[in-house]
Image: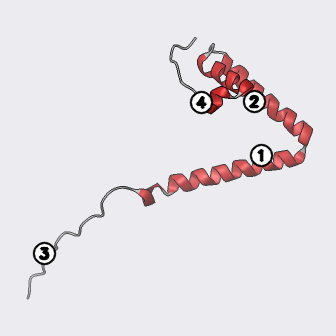
Amino acid sequence: MTTAAVALPRPVAKFPILGWMVDDAVSGHDDAKYYFIGNVVLTLVLAIYLFGYPLLIVLALAAAALALTTIVIFTAADMFENRRPRRRSARPSRPKR
């Protein structure tokens, strides 16, 4: 059993079944996180079985949008840098011939 206590965000903790599952996965027994992952995977498989191919397409589009957003955020980090602009140093003048 893990000894570190992690506080869940209030909306997640108040959500009836999902909150209990997440709380148990975070602060419960060591094998609870594997049961949580199994439950999430089985819920997705059941939803795909019930709603069919359109749900699979929507999940793929959401994953592609999330991946593209992540790539843009990671590669645009230089644009939001908080450093001051560098000053140009005074170049010594060329010697006259």
Badge 1 density bin: few <14, some 14–19, many ≥20, Cα 10 Å? some
- Which residue bears the numbered disc 4? 10
Q: Are marks 1 and 3 in contact (CB under 8 Å)?
A: no
Asked which quadrant contains residue 85, the reply is bottom left
Q: Which mark is residue 59?
A: 1
Q: Position of residue 44 (x, y in %)?
A: 80, 35
Location of mark 3 (residue)? 92
Q: CA distance from mark 4 to mark 1?
A: 26 Å
Q: Amino acid at mark 4?
A: Arg
Q: Earlier in the sequence, mark 4 or mark 1?
A: 4
Q: Earlier in the sequence, mark 2 or mark 3?
A: 2
Q: Residues within 10 Å of mark 2 (few under 14, many from 20)?
A: few
Residue furthest toward the bottom?
Answer: 97
Q: Nearer the viewer, mark 1 or mark 3?
A: 1
* Front residue of this view, candidates 15 and 94: 15
Element on which disc 2 rests? helix
Checking the image for residue 31, the label placed there is none
Looking at the image, which is closer to me, 1 or 10? 10
Q: Is residue 42 above or below residue 64?
A: above
Which quadrant, please, contains the C terminus? bottom left
Amino acid type at mark 1: Leu
Q: CA distance from mark 3 to mark 4?
A: 62 Å
Distance (Cα) linking label 2 and label 3: 67 Å
- Amino acid beneath label 3: Pro
Rounded to the nearest whole Å, what is the CA distance between mark 4 and mark 2?
A: 21 Å
Asked if marks 1 and 2 touch (Cβ < 8 Å), the reply is no
Quickly name the residue at label 2: 40
Give the Cα distance between marks 1 and 3.
61 Å
